Image (spheres, rainbow, N blue to C red):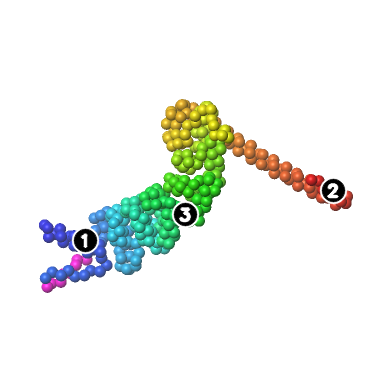
Amino acid sequence: MGTRVAARQVLRWTVMNASVFSPLQCGTCPLQPLRIPCRLICSSQNRNRASHQSLELRLQSGKPELSLLSLLDMGFTDSQAQQIYEDTSKLRGESAAKHALSTLTALFVLGLNPSSVQKLLEKCPELYTVRESLLQQRVGNLRKLGLVEGSLQRVVSHFPQILTVPVKTVKSMVMFLREKCLFTVQQVTDTLRDTPAIVLENMDQLEYKFQYVYFRMGVKQAEMVKSRLFRYTLDEVRSRHTFIERRGLYQTPDKKGQTIIINPRLDTILNVDQDAFLTDVANASAEEYEVFRRLLAREWQEEEWQHGSVEADGDDDGDALEEEDEEDEETRGKGGYRKKRK
């Protein structure tokens, strides 16, 4: 029985490592290894037959491409290797096959284990097509921004898309936070660590959100970073703030930062679910808040419509002024020199 098990293990190792079959020496009689088709092993492991045939062609061709064997050597389980191999096969173009191995290598260098790498690539298959040199540049830039070991791995695992963003785009966002929001270097690092998706957001909308919280709510930068402000949309922030403000539970600070009442912290307003917000902060029911949100949405829509109408009227006034200027020019041409109006 033990001999049979050992023979099976040797046979499995021979087939999986396989493009070259060397004879096994047994005494003076060389035994040629049995060439059992890989199709049998694949079926025993519930692998896709079409994927196996593609793998077999790759192994026979001897090309240094991504294969199940190379994935298994990296430490992936059979199911993980099969999933990654199928994902790369679905991606069209030579870039995926060309850069897949270098992408996996770069992720392992970060200190990620095979399970984390497989989940990360499921979230962001675009990483298969990124060149190794670009990956190294982007990882190096994140390190320069203060994302050290541990923080860097968590950011990449939570938001792998950050490795697809050009270094120039990330630097522009850092400059925005430093110059427009007046964040310190550490506050920028904390924001990138807690809200890495900010690198893909529109800067105009971010600036409006920052100004709303800074001027209307009177919240300073340190509290914004602590409450992870940029994880929430502007509508979410305005809805909750306006609701408690109109209920007399929040007051905009004066120029000296003073208020008559004690305002709830931004963290207790945003970093809780709706039920906790209504119970602990707003002292209201879900029905009241839902009706308020509908009325507030209508109010915002009317404000936007009025703002658009004012802009349109301004354009009409501009056209009328241009017509008056043209008439003045014609009059000056007919009547000779006249003193220009200031």
Q: For the N terminus, which image quadrant?
A: bottom left
Asked whether residue 120 is in view, the answer is: no
Disc 3: which residue: 165
Which residue appears at 24% of the width and 59% of the height? 40
- CA gap, disc 2 to disc 3? 59 Å
Q: Secondary structure at mark 3?
A: loop
Dominant secondary structure, magenta: loop
* Residue at (83, 50) in percent of width and height: 330
Q: Residue at image x 42%, y 56%?
A: 139
Residue 12 disc label: 1
Left or right of 106? Residue 42 is left
Q: Name the spot of residue 142 as percent of width and height, x first.
A: 44, 54
Q: Looking at numbered disc 2 in the image, what kind of residue is underneath it?
A: Lys
Residue 31 vs residue 205, the one in the foreground = 205
Q: Nearer the viewer, residue 78 or 280?
A: 280
Check disc 3 and give the amino acid type: Val
Q: Is residue 127 magenta?
A: no
**Amino acid type indicated by mark 1:** Arg
- Label 2: state its secondary structure: loop
Q: Where is residue 114 drawn, in percent x and y?
A: 32, 54
Residue range corresponding to the magenta coloring: 28-37
| Badge number at residue 339 | 2
For the residues bearing labels 2 and 3, Cβ distance under 8 angstroms: no
